[in-house]
């Protein structure tokens, strides 16, 4: 990598790190681009060498987060996951949950951004369906092999993702009563999604 590219990569990383700090401290809507560049120790104009807007920067942070999730499963050599299998379902939920916890400023910023835009734009639905694409593909595989699903794979995957992301937004805040151990959250979601409200019976895990 040449010196110019290395400096550009360093500046982009500094802007992302500064944005994460500012989103955590101020919230996404209250953070200005000048807050980000000041925290990064960069000139304001340098921001636009890398990002078209604050929304664009947030999208880049989200892409980094999605890349981590995809990299996790790409390392495994396996056919499509069977999400009716408890361990495989739990693994997907655990990866998503722990990534969300580790990227709390991104999750909070995404929620703020979507709420500010309102439902009319359809941004939240588009993001939800894109973010749950892997789940949808696994559900489509189940459907193709004759396994009954509660509904259309895209809608089911989005419902699963919506439950997970809203819970993350609520539980990853600073309120003392919102603190829950990761395993409790993951196991609760696993049982709920695997068995539904009717329940599997007392002997099931």
Image (tube, rainbow, N blue to C red):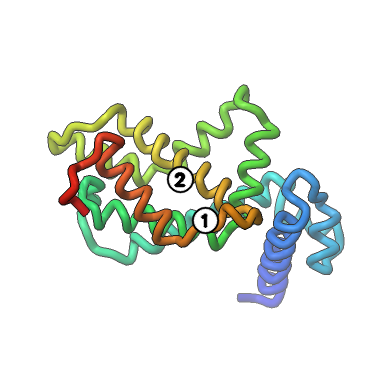
* Left or right relative to 164: residue 145: left
- The residue labelled by disc 2 is 164
The residue drawn where x is 79% and y is 58% is: 36
- The residue labelled by disc 1 is 100
The residue drawn where x is 22% and y is 54% is: 205
The residue drawn where x is 70% and y is 34% is: 116
Q: Residues within 10 Å of mark 2 (few under 14, many from 20)?
A: some
Using the image, determine if residue 169 lies above or below residue 65: above
Using the image, determine if residue 1 lies above or below residue 76: below
Q: CA distance from mark 1 to mark 2?
A: 9 Å
Using the image, determine if residue 101 lies above or below residue 114: below
> Which image quarter is the N terminus in?
bottom right
Mark 1 and mark 2 lie on one chain; the one further toward the N terminus is: 1
* Left or right relative to 187: residue 6: right
* Left or right relative to 161: residue 195: left
Where is residue 159? Give x, y as percent. 41, 35
């Amino acid at each position: 990598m040449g010196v110019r590219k290395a400096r550009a990569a360093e500046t982009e990383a500094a802007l992302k790190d500064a944005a994460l700090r500012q989103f955590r401290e101020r919230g996404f809507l209250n953070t200005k681009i000048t807050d980000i560049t000041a925290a990064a120790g960069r000139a304001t104009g340098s921001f636009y060498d890398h990002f078209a807007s604050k929304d664009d920067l947030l999208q880049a942070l989200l892409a980094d987060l999605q890349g981590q999730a995809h990299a996790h499963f790409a390392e495994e050599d396996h056919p499509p996951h069977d999400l009716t299998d408890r361990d495989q379902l739990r693994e997907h939920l655990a990866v998503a949950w722990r990534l969300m916890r580790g990227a709390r400023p991104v999750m909070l910023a995404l929620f703020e951004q979507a709420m500010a835009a309102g439902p009319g734009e359809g941004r939240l639905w588009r993001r939800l369906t894109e973010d749950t694409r892997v789940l949808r593909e696994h559900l489509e595989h189940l459907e193709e092999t004759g396994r009954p699903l509660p509904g259309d794979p895209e809608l089911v995957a989005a419902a699963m993702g919506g439950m997970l992301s809203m819970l993350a937004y609520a539980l990853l805040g600073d309120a003392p009563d919102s603190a829950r151990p990761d395993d409790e959250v993951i196991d609760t979601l696993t049982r709920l999604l695997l068995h539904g409200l009717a329940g599997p019976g007392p002997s099931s895990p």
